[in-house]
Amino acid sequence: MRWALWVLVASLGAVMSESIGRAGDEPNYDESKVPSYELPDPLKSASGRTIISPEEWRRVRRPEILKLFTEQMYGRAPKRPEAVLFEESLIADNVLGGKGEFRNVRIWLLGRREGPAMDVLLVLPKKAPRPVPAFVAMNFRGNASTHPHPKIPLSRNWMRNDPRRGFVDHRMTEKARGVAASRWPYEQILDRGYAVATVYYGDVDPDFDDGFQNGIHPWFYRPGQRRPAPDEWGSIAAWAWGLSRIMDYLERQDRIDPKHVAVMGHSRLGKTALWAGATDSRFGIVISNNSGCGGAALSRRRFGETVRRINTSFPHWFCENFKKYNDREDAMPFDQHMLLALIAPRPVLVCSAEEDRWADPRGEFLSCLHADPVYRLLGTDGLGTKTMPPVHRPVLTTVGYHIRAGKHDVTALDWKVYCDFADRHWKRGGKSERRGGAAK
Ligand code: GTR
């Protein structure tokens, strides 16, 4: 009995020290506790050479940085399929107050009918001169969650359960139509002359850790391979690869102008949008919303979500090699400002929300600031400020930054800023045309 008590006390002690050990896991939200850190210089090559010309950036440093992120963080993805296979159908004409049209495009991800396909919802303005510029953005809950229209096909793929909102037994039900509509103000976007192409990210890879047995990954395994190698793609790289397959399609149709496509994403899909923009230069503008750790936020700040935390909660998002940096942020030969730099000189807009401290708004701003030298080297106006702007005062230079009041979310105000940003850089719209011309 006494012995049993001793075992109980000892194991309780173990549990307690375990939980004390984990006290360090409490996220830091105190700016004064951000450790001091030194960022790798995006303009210094691995051999220590200072990069002083755009040509050297393109030839030497950019490929080095791309390789680091590819092999150490997101993972190598397969090349684009040789063929592009898709099928388009009209869902509904005269939607959104008669201003728009919904179409469905099924894209076979391997370029052939065997294998997985994704369904892209196209929201097209009826009146705007064609071809129109567009936003490409993945959604979390299926295309039918973005608008209540009864004819948008319900996704049959795996979804996270949320019975109150109509996600039952990992499937979407009729009840879930339109549940995410507040994040997709289609009418407002059409009024600005833009189209939207959206796809459920789970069409490419369901977002849970199953050792990469479902989704797109197994289709690319070599004989005998059971999971991606340590430097091969995790889910974020797979979703980004899926976004590139939308570009393959957009290059083969005439409603949307493939030279004016902005890729946008929220949260984990904001991380995805940044990686898609870094790896595929066909995306003319890149927009991340509340992307945080593994997205726009500097990892070394360890503010809010950390590398260890993200790799523990979501072991499938990054490649296996990234786990080497759990609690070892200072050992990373890169940080997220260099991810933004990979997008240069194309415009990138980083958006934060004031209450979304988990995503470290300040760390997102600082990434922009430290990507600025690369953008300037390449002849753009970079980030037009050195100080973090207050809420609702977006900076819309080539490296743009916007913070709004409120929580982790996408709102109609955010979309207004995305459209303003795109107008400005694509020199569209009366007022912004003038501003765009003057932007220096
Ligand atoms: C959180 C995760 C974040 C962010 C977010 C989301 O749980 O820690 O990195 O990606 O999910 O995607 O909504």
Image: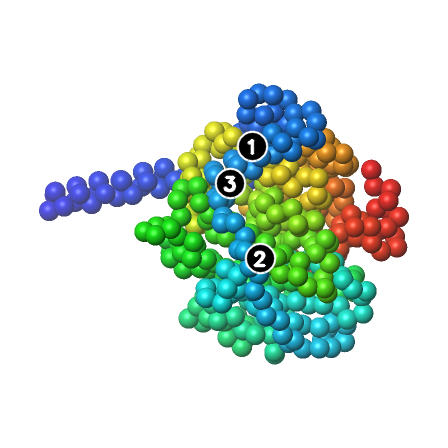
Q: Is residue 219 visible?
A: yes
Q: Are marks 1 and 2 in contact (CB under 8 Å)?
A: no
Q: Is residue 70 above or below residue 184?
A: above
Instruction: Please tell me which residue lies in front, 252 or 268.
Output: 252
- Spatial CA distance of label 1 from label 2 is 25 Å
Q: Residue drawn at (59%, 39%), measured in percent from left and top? A: 339
Q: Identify residue for label 2.
A: 245
Q: Secondary structure at mark 1?
A: helix
> In the displayed structure, does residue 173 sit left or right of residue 218?
right
Q: Secondary structure at mark 3?
A: helix
Which of the image's four quarters has the C terminus?
top right
> In the displayed structure, does residue 5 sit left or right of residue 220?
left
Q: Are marks 2 and 3 in contact (CB under 8 Å)?
A: no
Q: Are marks 1 and 3 in contact (CB under 8 Å)?
A: no
Some atom of ligand 1 lies within 8 Å of the CB belonging to the residue at label 3: no
Q: Identify residue for label 3.
A: 70
Q: Is residue 34 above or below residue 189?
A: above
Identify the mark nearer the N-term, 2 or 3: 3
Instruction: Please tell me which residue lies in front, 293 or 94.
Output: 94
